[in-house]
Image: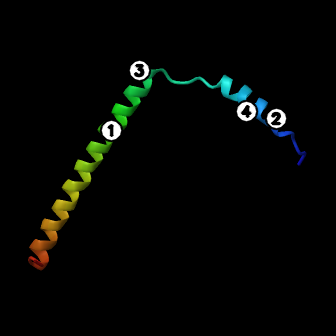
Amino acid sequence: MAKSNPFTFLQQVRSETAKVTWPSRRETMISTMMVLAMVVIASLFFFTVDQIYGWGFDFIFGPTR
């Protein structure tokens, strides 16, 4: 593996970063809202499943409290 100069490396990093297509503010906000919506939906789903399992175990084995 050839050693490279740190200055050359930073130039290459800067060059590659310039090629990146960055999302617009609107695209970032939409993506953020979609992620938050999916987190809420997943949370509600897992809460509901946990409650159903809890009721099922209480029904089968009796209340443990």
Using the image, determine if residue 51 lies above or below residue 21. below
Q: Position of residue 46 (x, y in %)?
A: 26, 54
Q: Nearer the viewer, mark 2 or mark 4?
A: 2
- Residue type at mark 3 is Arg
Q: Position of residue 58 (x, y in %)?
A: 11, 73
Q: Residues within 10 Å of mark 2 (few under 14, many from 20)?
A: few
Q: Residues within 10 Å of mark 1 (few under 14, many from 20)?
A: few
Q: Position of residue 5 (x, y in %)?
A: 86, 39
57 left or right of 11?
left
Quadrant of the image for the C terminus?
A: bottom left
- How far apart are the two marked residues, 2 and 4, measured between alpha carbons? 10 Å
**Which quadrant of the view contains residue 52?**
bottom left
Q: Earlier in the sequence, mark 1 or mark 4?
A: 4
- Residue type at mark 4 is Val
Badge 3 marks a residue whose secondary structure is helix
Using the image, determine if residue 10 lies above or below residue 24. below
- How far apart are the two marked residues, 2 and 1, measured between alpha carbons? 41 Å
According to the image, what is the colour scheme of the structure?
rainbow
Q: Position of residue 55 (x, y in %)?
A: 12, 66
Report the residue marked by disc 4.
Answer: 13
- Residue type at mark 1 is Leu
Report the residue marked by disc 2.
Answer: 7
Q: Nearer the viewer, mark 1 or mark 4?
A: 4
Residue at 16% of width from left, 72% of height from top?
A: 57
Q: Earlier in the sequence, mark 3 or mark 1?
A: 3
Report the residue marked by disc 3.
Answer: 26
